[in-house]
Amino acid sequence: MSGSKRLLEDLEADRQWAESMLLDAGALKECELHGYLVDQMDSSAFEDAVLAGRQESSENEEAIRHKLQNVLNDYGDECPGCEANAAD
Ligand SMILES: [Zn+2]
């Protein structure tokens, strides 16, 4: 089962890499109060992240775009902590 464990670790590394690209470009931001990552809905920041990703990766633009978009899709455009506070 070491093969599938390695695959999971690769996926996790990929994900962390994509997250750091999105954070550096400002497409994702951490909520100062709760620490959740929040999608900034900023398409130009997303393009910056794709550009930065292309500098760091040997993969083609399509693959990088897909990878970054997948990670971004996991986050909402509001921090779950702030949403819960607003509902009170
Ligand atoms: Zn928050």
Image: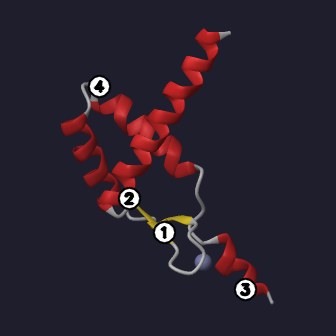
Q: x and y percent of residue 78 in the render?
A: 59, 72
Q: Going from the N terminus, do you reach mark 4 or mark 1 first?
A: 1
Q: Going from the N terminus, do you reach mark 2 or mark 4 first?
A: 2
**Residues at marks 1 and 2, CA–CA distance in whole angstroms:** 8 Å
Q: Going from the N terminus, do you reach mark 3 or mark 1 first?
A: 1
Q: Going from the N terminus, do you reach mark 1 or mark 2 first?
A: 2
Q: Going from the N terminus, do you reach mark 4 or mark 3 first?
A: 4
Amino acid on which the number 4 mark rests in the picture = Glu
Q: Secondary structure at mark 4?
A: loop
User: Disc 4 marks which residue?
Assistant: 59
Labels 4 & 3 near each other (Cβ < 8 A): no
Labels 2 & 4 near each other (Cβ < 8 A): no
Amino acid on which the number 2 mark rests in the picture = Leu
**Residues at marks 4 and 3, CA–CA distance in whole angstroms:** 41 Å
Q: Pick out the residue farthest to the front.
A: 2
- Would you say 23 lies left or right of 78 here? left
**Residues at marks 2 and 3, CA–CA distance in whole angstroms:** 24 Å
User: Disc 1 marks which residue?
Assistant: 30
The one of 21 and 41 positioned closer to us in this rendering: 21
User: Disc 2 marks which residue?
Assistant: 23
**4 or 1: mark nearer the eye:** 1
**Residues at marks 2 and 4, CA–CA distance in whole angstroms:** 20 Å
Q: x and y percent of residue 54 in the render?
A: 23, 37
Query: In the image, what residue occupies the spot 39% across and 61% down?
Result: 27
**Residues at marks 3 and 1, CA–CA distance in whole angstroms:** 17 Å
User: Disc 3 marks which residue?
Assistant: 85
**Residues at marks 4 and 1, CA–CA distance in whole angstroms:** 27 Å
Against 64, residue 75 (above or below) is: below
Query: In the image, what residue occupies the spot 68% across and 9% down?
Result: 1
